[in-house]
Image: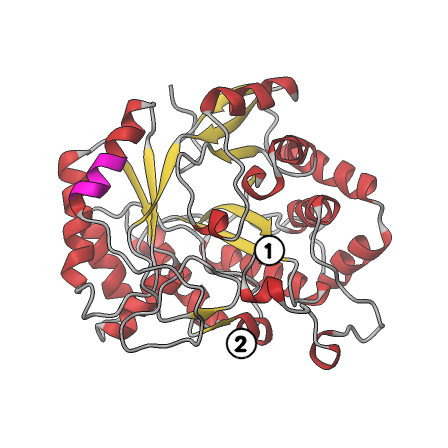
Amino acid sequence: MSPATAFAPRPAAASRLSDADALSLYFDASIHELGRRAHAVTMRLHPEPYRTYVVDRNINYANWCTARCIFCNFKADPPGLDSGRRDLPDGYVLSFDQIAAKIEELIAIGGTQVLMQGGLVPADILPFTWYTDLMRFIKSNYPGVHIHAFSPPEIHALHEIFDMPVREVLLRLQDAGLDTIPGGGAEILSDRVRNRIAQGKTTVDQYLNVMREAHRIGMRTSVTMMFGHVETIEERVEHLRRIRDLQDETGGFTAFILWTFQPGDTPLGRVKPFDPDEDARPDGRRLVLADAHEYLRMLALARVYLDNIDNIQSSWVTQGPKIGQLALFYGANDMGSVMMEENVVSAAGTTFRLAEQDLRRLITDAGWTPQKRNCYYEPIA
């Protein structure tokens, strides 16, 4: 697959929503009207009698991280870096044997892919060869396992730490066995928001540049959004627009996944989330931490707005199984993963778990046939 012909971006819909349209829908339409419109889009894109899910496992290979995200309780400060927090866990790096044991447990339950993410790890803890050796280790021992790994902030960090162009980082990882990239680390694609809650991570342009370069070399990616903290509604729409614009350009996004901020005992969750000077809306309206109602509204709005991304995933991991099931009527066509292992969201205190049979039952009870898929949203046996 050559970079020039990797994907064929779909032309914009004739009735494409503008940002003003999206804001009007958010503020003026009822949740039922939003849901109706979103479900109509989903049924047009996915008239098939099934709804999909994937059996995979999150493997967080390391938690050392130089970023200073105030919504995260998972990271550990690398030696020599003091973020001022005294509530952080000990740092670790999994051995290849530990990773192999986790993959074997995944295969034993019929799993087909691993989602691997870690922190932004300094070079004196992990050299670049560790990452490529890991890819080759997995592919040589488990050739049937799809590797969905290394979020854009991780890729960008490798670019900076090892003084290597982003494209070269991606090509080396791809050559070693990396299949696709997850969309983690997007949070809200507004630099105002990122400077407040995710210092030391990528800027908006840096995040999108990693995605663009991945798509150019023929590598598909997902893309995400974490909302319900210090952002305005306008910034949520800005986030959607930046994603839609890049999809117009490259066509490389397989799916969009959004979830609500899980405050737990994180620094962001322990403080008043809004600063009156920085976070008040011009019209006087203020946001609140997102609940299930807000999740469904944003899910539906995203489905109507993102007319060039085929798949939207339900976030039962943060919303629970029943809202996750209801999401199938508010724009989602996929129930996501069984989440055999999840460490980052659970570190903030959210611990929903579902086995494959539970996920299948939720889909069946909603009126569809459950269908296992791969990372490209293609049905598999």
The residue depicted at 45 percent of the width and 32 percent of the height is 338
Magenta residues span: 97-102
Residue 49 shows in this picture:
no
Say which quarter of the image contains residue 160: bottom left
Principal SS element in the magenta part? helix
Q: Position of residue 346 (x, y in %)?
A: 48, 47
Magenta region includes residue 209: no
The one of 24 and 27 positioned closer to us in this rendering: 27
Location of residue 67 by image quarter:
bottom left
- Kind of residue at badge 2: Asn
Q: Are marks 1 and 2 in contact (CB under 8 Å)?
A: no
| SS of the residue under disc 2 | helix
Q: Which residue is mark 2?
A: 195
43 displayed left or right of 87? right
| Quadrant housing residue 318 | top right
* Residue 59 x, y percent position in the rendering: 33, 45
Question: Which of the pair 207/47 is nearer the observer?
Answer: 207
Is 136 positioned to the left or the right of 180 in the image?
left
Q: Position of residue 273 (x, y in %)?
A: 67, 68
- Residue type highlighted by circle 1: Phe
Residue 126: x and y in percent read 20, 63
- The 10 Å Cα crowd at callout 1, few under 14, some 14 to 19, many 20 or more, is many
| Residue 98: in magenta span | yes
Left of 32 or right of it: where is 253? left
Identify which residue is drawn at 17% across, 54% down.
Answer: 132
Q: Residue at x 81, y 76 (%)?
A: 282
Q: Measured along the vertical axis of the image, is residue 154 above or below residue 255?
A: below
Tag nearer the camera, 1 or 2: 1
The numbered mark, 1 or 2, whose residue comes first in the sequence reads 2
How far apart are the alpha carbons under marks 1 and 2? 16 Å
Question: Which residue matches tag 1?
Answer: 261
> Quick check: 297 above or below 340?
below
